[in-house]
Image: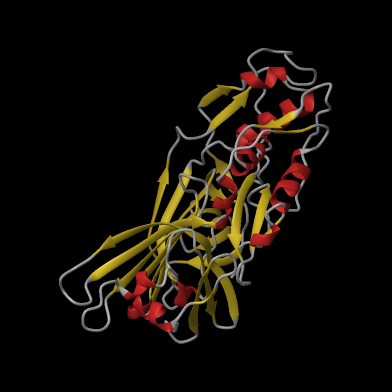
Amino acid sequence: MNLLAGTRLAFLIGKTIPEPAPASFVRAIEEIEVIQGDTATGRDAFRITLSVGRSGVGAVEYDQLSTGLLDPLQRVAVIGQIGASPVGVLDGMILDHHFAPSTEPGRSKLILTGEDISVLMDFEEKNKAYPNQPDGIIAMQIVGGYAKYGLVPPVSPSGPMETVLQRVTTQTETDFAFLTRLAARNGHAFYAEPTPVPAVSLVSWGPERLGSPQSALTMNFLTGTTVHGLRFHLDAFSPREETLPATGALPGLGGFAGAQSTSPPLAAMPQAPVRRRMARDATKMSTARAQARLAAGRSASPDALVAEGELDVARYGQPLRARRLVGLQGAGPAHSGLYYVRQVTHRIRPRMGQYLQSFTMVREGRGSTTAVVRR
């Protein structure tokens, strides 16, 4: 599927291992929308809009519906290539159909919606105990059980381990909900990310805001501007501090001593928290677990500075990736510097040759911690 010069998309579909879709299906695609990052379910979501029709006189069923290839629970993958660099845009599962037939030829619409492939981990609740095992090892075991679907287990810090004399980690929910809970109590993120390899997604279970920043977004440059519609919002009420409810509740932890975030700072002038939330459950934990709990709560504190904007992927040179750092230049000393990309929405319109993105990125406040961002 060609979009613009140097930009191609591969569309694959199938039951367990998706294969290249028939040309007739690809030609029917009007728009592909993929939301990556901060969503209500914690999983990436997608929507694919197709024009559908019936071929031949007396045909009863619509062509795109008659084969069953687009039925719910089919796996869909989209791989993009900008220049010489392939990138995974989508690896997900169709969950439902929205069909709107029309009496006018070519105006009937089929909209497929779904979520990323980690939705497979949210189908069945389980009861299981994991005595004497750190959370990171538990995460690797669970994800390893989905190897046949191409889910690659995470490699990450394990976090504190509690013995059976202290507490046994117990699962009473789906694998997805359980791993989300374990990640949250360690100040980590848990998600699946598509790769350029068909039917392979990399599962992340670990700290956020690490790794090399993406190429910088640029504004106010005559020939090099890559973003437009950029807007900033500073909310002083968002940040909060995690504390213990009583002094000396745990050895080595002062009660009301603010916990440090597990994420590296991105702002030179972070907005000081005005809200204080008591981690009452931490008083029942071991010292190591309570320390991790406080740090996790601080990491989960909403960021004060939010930036939103749009970009053209062809001009930027690559798709902007969610859950990564990115630099911004040209926005002035208070707003330039590094940000964490919280959410990205891909909007691909093959017939119009468009590949656009809108994005939301955040940090703790104003001012940059670095003098130079990666170009």
261 left or right of 55 in image: right
- Can I make out residue 220 in this image? no
Q: From this viewpoint, which residue is outermost toward the left?
A: 103
Residue 167, compared with residue 103, is above or below; it is: above
Residue 116, compared with residue 224, is above or below; it is: above
Which residue does the image show at 71% across and 52% down from the upper left?
Answer: 145
Label count reads 0
Which residue does the image show at 50% across and 59% down from the upper left?
Answer: 93
Estimate the x, y position of residue 193 in percent, counting from the top left: 59, 59
Which residue does the image show at 25% across and 77% down from the upper left?
Answer: 59
Estimate the x, y position of residue 117 in percent, counting from the top left: 56, 57
Residue 310, compared with residue 294, is above or below; it is: below
Estimate the x, y position of residue 158 in percent, counting from the top left: 78, 42
- Can I make out residue 283 in this image? yes
Residue 177, compared with residue 342, is above or below; it is: above
Which residue does the image show at 52% across and 61% down from the upper left?
Answer: 92
194 left or right of 39 in image: right
Residue 123 or residue 254, whichever sits in front = 123
Quadrant of the drawing holding the C terminus: bottom right
Colour approach in the figure = secondary structure
Estimate the x, y position of residue 13 in percent, counting from the top left: 50, 71
Q: Quadrant of residue 325?
A: bottom right
Quadrant of the drawing holding the N terminus: bottom left
